[in-house]
Image: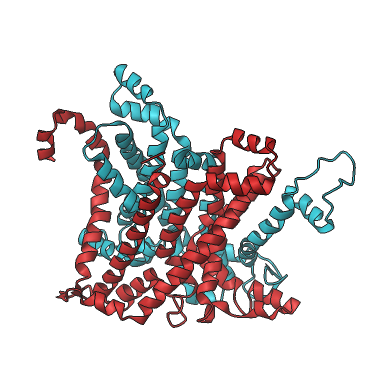
Amino acid sequence: MTSATITRPKPRRDWLPGTLFLLPTFVLFALFVVYPIIYNVQASTLDWDGVNIGEFVGLGNYTELLKDPIFVTTLKNSGWWILLTIVPQALIGFFLALLLNEKIRGRSIYRAIFFVPAVLSPVVVGIVWQRMLDPFNGVFAKIGRATGLEFLTKGYLADPKTAIFAAIVVNVWMWTGFSMLFYLAGLQLIDDSVLQAAKIDGASTWKTVTAIIWPLLKSTHLSLLLLGIIGSLKTFELVYVLTEGGPNHASEMLPTYTFKQAFQLQSVGYASTISVVLLVIAVVSSLSMVRAFGSGFLTGDDKK
Amino acid sequence: MTITVEKSQVKTGTTDVPVRGRKRRPHWAHLILTPMAILWLVPIVMVLGLSLLPTSNPSTTAYGLFPAEPSFGNYIEIWTNNPILQNLINSALITVPSVLLVMLFGSMTAFALARLRVPLKAVIFGALTLALILPMSSIVVSVFKILQSMGLYNNLLGLVLVYTALGLPFAVIIIRTSFLAVPEEMYEAAVLDGAGKFKVYWKVYLPLSKPALAVVAVWQSMSSWNDFLLPLVTLQDNELKPLTLIPLAYRGVFLSQPGALFAILVLISIPIVVVFLAVQRHLVNGLSGAIK
């Protein structure tokens, strides 16, 4: 900082107020964001139980990770999660936003109903849906038995083939309202005159929506895409409560696996390795999106 | 209110011609929205219904949604027999300070980045944006170790500080956009009038950014109130635990009292739903200010 002050012609005092405004954020950020990342990277090179002194193993944890079949499962599950949450949430959310952008009666009640799941704790949502999907007492099972729809009575969370998809359905229920809210916000920014012009030109509703409104919401789509990717990679609580990553790791996600390694198996070095990989995946996917589309959708700036 | 009216519409399927002359014709969108809203509400109705399960005969009716003999016994039970009040207070002691700190520090940072001269502005902003994507679970191991070495393990203050740090990037990005929308001339005029920079920030910029602050407040309340992972690994004493840890911590106990479990879930959810409903009308505006 001192060298920068010398090279710049502006007096240092000029920076002082701004720096003071930044100070609290800077301290917290250094302590709880930057330092943990460095700490993680360092710990990932150790064979360490978190208590005794760790043994340096270089990239040993990383090579082990590549051979770990559970790691492969977590990657596969993250891929499914990204694909099967983002697309339905965006389509249903967009559709709801279109309807609820109209001045219809009770629209704020509708908006609240669809958004409320997103404000609930994943712990609450997880336990509630465990019960919903319970093959004996669950709502689905009871409806299934009453109507003869056998497929509703199955224990989807307990079946390794379906557990991850059941969790994904719960996630869609939880977060679709969030996408709706983003699209509602995006719709507010669309100039009415554009839509009026389309109407005068005789464009059908379908045409207006697909050819005008949808493309105009590009930055909303991108924000939701990025948030969806990051949110998918981050998913911990919902899966932990619903299935604990089971049965037999079938619905394991990167964070649940990290947690197990660190706090149940005491392999802190290995857990840090998974964390670093998770962080790298998150950063690379976000940076490549910013590279491809510019950072405007993320920061709210028009161009950059 | 509207919903019940519409429900009958759905059943009879008469949208084309209003049967009784003058009544305002309901919008066709209700035909889609009402069934979807009902579908979306099923889990909510279920948790409310099951929280009324009696302890003695916890059988249900109506597809497992409602208890056969509803009772408020569970609410009384969790209030008197479990120390749930302490957990509720703990949740508040974590959430309220972290929300206030995020709003304060976040808006200060946003002000510096939007209007003040700061070295390496682009780098700072880039780092913040990057931290937006930082998954909590990827740093929880090291945060746990750091809190331990700071003497903040098993301490609510540690949670407040971590939540504040992790909430700042989102807050800065949202509030900065809103500050940028305030004409720069207002800043210059106020400074020319002799107002200090802090005063301009406090008296001019903050009041003009209420929608953005509302978005930040809701978002941060959600993240602090609802979080489960960090208290799970950094709190040991039962007297310190926030509400979110209770359902799983006492899973065994709740096996025999499913109603009490669902009553606690309702209790966890009420405050955050109230916060959301209180600022709901600001949310869309605040967000559209932020993402424009």
Q: Which quadrant of the figure has residue A142?
A: bottom right
Relative depth, front residue between B65 and B122: B122
Q: How many marks?
A: 0
- Residue A145, horizontal then vertical, whole percent: 71, 79
Quarter placement of the N terminus of chain A: top left
Residue pictured at 29% horizontal, 27% vertical: B197
Residue found at the very far top of the displayed protein: B193
Relative depth, front residue between B281 and A294: A294
Q: Is residue B57 in sight in this rendering?
A: no
Quarter placement of the C terminus of chain A: top left
Q: Which chain is cyan?
A: B
Vertical side of A210 occupied by A6: above or below: above
Q: Is residue B181 in sight in this rendering?
A: yes
With A212 as the anchor, is A225 left or right in this view?
left
Residue found at the very far right of the displayed protein: B20
- Residue B214, horizontal then vertical, whole percent: 47, 41
Q: Which chain is red?
A: A
Vertical side of B151 occupied by B251: above or below: below
- Residue A289, horizontal then vertical, whole percent: 39, 54
- Residue A202, horizontal then vertical, whole percent: 70, 39
Residue found at the very far front of the displayed protein: A201
With B131 as the anchor, is A185 left or right in this view?
right
